[in-house]
Image: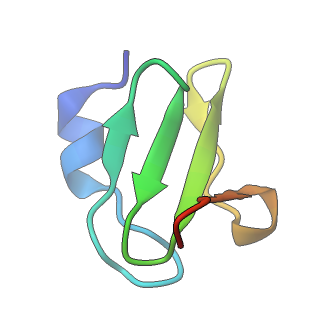
Amino acid sequence: MIDPWLLARLVCPVTRQPLRYDEAAQELVSEAAGLAYPIRAGVPVMLPEEARRLMDA
């Protein structure tokens, strides 16, 4: 689980838009950029080159 306080402050580094937490996939999703940033060992990896492209983006 990601801290709600932290989630409210994180934004996509590409679009500067809010992120959605996907608990099942352990990712922070940027709908605007079509990217999903992984969370590894409880730490969000906010690097575009580490993000997964969303299928419908």
Residue 24 vertical placement versus 6 (above, below): above
**Residue shown at the point (46%, 45%) measured from the top left:** 28
Q: Nearer the viewer, residue 57 or 46?
A: 57
- The residue lying furthest to the right in this view is 49
Q: Quadrant of the N terminus?
A: top left
Q: Residue 5 in the image: x percent, y percent?
A: 18, 36
Q: Residue 33 in the image: x percent, y percent?
A: 49, 77
**Residue shown at the point (64%, 40%) measured from the top left:** 38
Q: Residue 13 in the image: x percent, y percent?
A: 51, 75
Q: In screen coordinates, is 4 left or right of 1?
A: left
Residue 56 vertical placement versus 2 (above, below): below
Q: In screen coordinates, is 40 left or right of 43?
A: right
Name the image quarter holding residue 2: top left
Residue 39 vertical placement versus 13 (above, below): above
- The residue lying furthest to the front in this view is 56
**Residue shown at the point (35%, 37%) measured from the top left:** 21
**Residue shown at the point (36%, 65%) measured from the top left:** 11
Q: Nearer the viewer, residue 37 or 24?
A: 24
Residue 34 vertical placement versus 42 (above, below): below
